Image: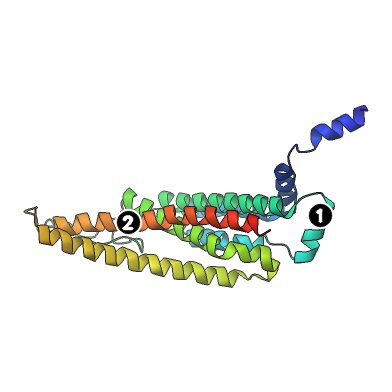
Amino acid sequence: MTGSALTTARQRPSTPLRRALGHEWRRCRHLLALYGVLITVTLQCAIHLDLRLGFVLILLAVRLPADLADPVLEDGRQLCSALGISRADTVRARTLLVSGGQLLLVLGTAGVILLSDWPPGTRHWSTLQVATSLDPGPASPTLGDHLVDIGLFSGAIAWTHALMGGDAFRLGARLTGRRAVAVYLGTCLLLGVVLSLSGMLTAELLLRVGTDDDPYAPFALAAKSAQGIAVSLALGGGIAALVLRARRWVRRA
C-alpha cells in the first residue's frame, strides 16, 4: 500500500455508522452551529437581562427532526448510496445527531431556567400550588420545581421525536415543523391532565387514610407524588418510546 493510500485509509472512518455520522455532521453542522450561538445568546439574556427565552430553544428542539431532514428525499438517498452509506446507517446516524442536538438545546433551556431570577409569585406550569398552615405568602419556585419542569418538557420533546421523527425519514423536508409543534403542545396538555388527576387521586387516598394531624400534609405529599408520576411517564416513557421507535425506523429503512 502506498503512502497516500495508507493515509486515506487512516483518515476514513472505520465503520459504516461512523461514515454516516460524518456525512450527517458535514451536512448539518452549520445549522447546529447556529443553534449553539442561539443557546449562548439565550443564556446571556437570562443572566444579564433577566429574559427567559428558553421557549425558543424548546421549539427548536421540537422542530429539529424536520429541520435536519433531507430537502429532497431522493437526492439524499442517492448521495448516501454514492458514498456507500446504507439507509439503515443513515437512519441511525441522523437519529443520534437529532437526539444530541435536542439534548444540547434542552441543557441550554435548563440553564436559562436555573440561572434566571424568579421573583416571588412566579411559577412553572407544572408547579402544583399547595396551601400550608403557615401561609407564608407567594414564594419563588424551588429547585425541585425547576427540575420537575425540565423533566416534563424534556419528556414531551422525546415523545414528540418518537411520534414524528419517522415522518422525517419517510417524507423528507415536507415534514413541517408546525406539525411537530402541535404534537408537542398536545403532549404537554396531556401531561398537565396526568399531573392534575394523579394529584387529586393521591390527595383523596391520603385523606381517606388520615395518618397525619396536619390537614395540609396530604395535599403537599400528593403534589410531590403527582409530579414524580408525571416526570416518570414523560421522561422515562419518552426515552423508552424513542429507543423503540428508532429501532423500528432502522428495520423499515
What element does badge 2 sit on? Answer: helix
What residue is at 57 percent from the left and 65 percent from the top?
A: 164
Question: Can residue 182 be seen from the camera position used here?
Answer: yes
The residue under label 2 is 229
Residue 27 x %, y %: 74, 53
Q: Is residue 33 left or right of residue 225?
A: right
Q: In the image shown, does 176 or 32 lie closer to the viewer?
A: 176
Q: Amino acid at mark 1?
A: Ser
The quarter of the picture where the C terminus appears is bottom right
What residue is at 32 percent from the left and 63 percent from the top?
A: 195
What residue is at 11 percent from the left and 57 percent from the top?
A: 209
Q: In the image shown, does 227 or 233 lie closer to the viewer?
A: 233
- Residue 34, by quadrant, is bottom right
Here the colouring is: rainbow
The residue under label 1 is 81
Residue 25 x %, y %: 71, 49
Between disc 2 and disc 1, the foreground one is 1
Badge 1: residue crowd in 10 Å (few <14, some 14–19, many ≥20): few
Specify which label sits upstream in the sequence, 2 or 1. 1
Report the residue that reaches farthest toward the left: 213
Report the residue that reaches farthest toward the right: 2
The quarter of the picture where the N terminus appears is top right
Residue 43 x %, y %: 51, 51
Badge 2: residue crowd in 10 Å (few <14, some 14–19, many ≥20): some
Q: Are marks 2 and 1 in contact (CB under 8 Å)?
A: no
Q: Amino acid at mark 2?
A: Ile
Q: Is residue 202 left or right of residue 101?
A: left
Q: Which mark is residue 42?
A: none
Query: Could you give the CA–CA distance between mark 2 and mark 1, rounded to whole angstroms?
Result: 45 Å
